[in-house]
Image: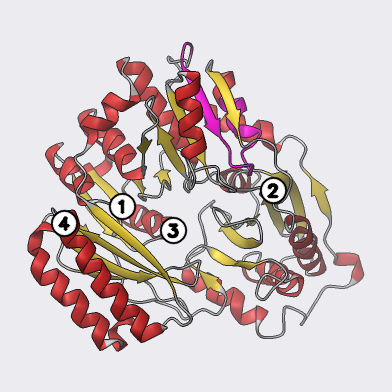
Amino acid sequence: MVKAEMAKAPMTTSAATEHRRGPRVERKIFGTDGVRGEANTYPMTTEIAMAIGRAIVKVIGRGGHHSRVVIGKDTRLSGYMLESALVSGIASAGGDVYLVGPLPTPGIAHMTQAMRADAGVVISASHNPYADNGIKIFGRDGYKLPDEVESELESIVFGDGGLASLPTSADLGKAFRIQDALGRYVTFVKSTFPRELRLDGLRIVVDCAHGAAYRAGPLVLEELGGEVRTLGVKPNGKNINLNCGALHPAQLAREVKSARADIGIALDGDADRLIVVDEHGHVVDGDAIMALVGARRLADHSLRKKTLVATVMSNLGLERAIERAGGKLVRTAVGDRYVVEAMRRHGYNIGGEQSGHLVFLDYTTTGDGLIAALQVLAVMVRESRSISELAAEAMERVPQLLVNLKVAHKRPLDELPEVDRAIKAAEKKLGNEGRVVVRFSGTEPKVRIMIEGPDEAQIKSHADSIAAALQSALG
């Protein structure tokens, strides 16, 4: 079972926290972002997918005949297999399916709301390699399901598999294909860009990671007037995220410099995250984007309650930047769903992750790389300034080191005394000048160590000590 992160070390006194010390609900297959794993291997099998389909109708559709479920996917080869299984499960339980084909994850959230559907399903493993796949589910409100509902789905999947009380043949569901989903989503995304602005004169390189936004990304930018060059727009089922996109921006950086472009925009496989490259080929991550946009929203009084939401992994420099601009930062557990959860609970409207999941609740219900990119482009156009200038002044980054270790088993960190001692030793040395976060990944068999502090050699030494303790304890 994947444990939620343990956030160690005190944060500065002004940083409110929402992160949890452990999972609220024990779950078998649902992690921090739906079900995920190697395709055609448990739990990403057609049998599980079919059972999830039936469970969706019974739980979210509340068993009603002809519940409406939207299904979209990214460009992975295994998407066809899982899509067919989900359709079979939903239809066998009496639900109707609306297929939209490859579309960004936020596009499925939008379509679910727009079509007044009972649920939306995305078949995607986001930034993972093509061999993996996943299933994530939105409710009728366009938001990801809370842990408790996912647990209810699991109880059916691992109970009778949704086979009890199936409808008669006369009440089976149907499947429909929505032909204009791409156009609807592109129009929606463009509507979030200020109507008085255009992208005329801006040279933009967009890398769509051979993923779900390979058509939508270029269309949005071109229709707003940008001069667009494209990378990662030739999916073949196996090249999604392969040395491209938000996780691998090196190719984009080279192309931006070669083309003398003004900005590079990198999306991941399902286009729910954004990484920017400036005109010099330097990466601008989610923290810098939040600092840049957050400061302007504070200035024009559109950042609700003067609060930005980020996770425990966001750089201390972001927190300090928001404080200097007159606001505050609230931290949550890792995962955009927990960022959104805190935003909805307290009425905040902007939040995100260092990795590029950026959420603007004024426009949408989940992270959207294209909408986030338009917010950055709007600042560039309105202020007639380069992205490098804007990013440089947005925040002063505190040295941060992230170490990822593969582990054979995931045990609660509070059951590992050697690890706890190593963490406490680092905390004591860093004091209030740094932070230590040790957590298990919610989507991969890894443990992550994040350390911040004023001295790079010091934080590396602490990271090495904690990593050695973890390797000894977990193998």
Q: What's the distance in space between the residues labelled 2 and 1, CA to CA?
A: 29 Å
Mark 2 lies on a secondary structure that is loop
Furthest-right residue in view? 169
Image quadrant assignment for residue 38: bottom right
* Amino acid at the residue labelled 1: Ala
Instruction: Judge depth for marks 4 and 1 and give the one in front.
Output: 4
| Image x and y of residue 247, in percent | 48, 48
Contact flag, marks 4 and 3 (Cβ < 8 Å): no
Taking the spot 25% from the left edge, 54% from the top edge, the residue there is 400
Of the residues under marks 1 and 3, which one precedes in the sequence? 1
Disc nearest the viewer among 2 and 1: 2
Residue at mark 2: 75
Residue located 42% across and 20% down the image? 262
Secondary structure, mark 4, is: loop
User: Which mark lies nearer to you, 2 or 3?
Assistant: 2
**Between 205 and 71, which is closer to the camera in this rendering?**
205
Label 2 to label 3, Cα distance in Å? 23 Å
What's the amino acid at mark 2?
Thr
First-in-chain label (2 vs 4): 2
Q: Which residue is mark 1?
A: 310
| Residue 453's disc number | 4
In the rendered view, tell whether residue 110 sits above or below residue 132. Answer: above
| In the image, residue 427 above or below residue 68 | below
> Alpha-carbon neighbours of circle 1 within 10 Å: few (<14), some, or many (≥20)?
many
Residue count near mark 2 (Cα–Cα under 10 Å), binned few <14, some 14–19, many ≥20: many
Q: Is residue 19 above or below residue 227?
A: below
Return the disc, 2 or 1, that comes first in the chain's sequence.
2
Q: Is residue 179 magenta?
A: no
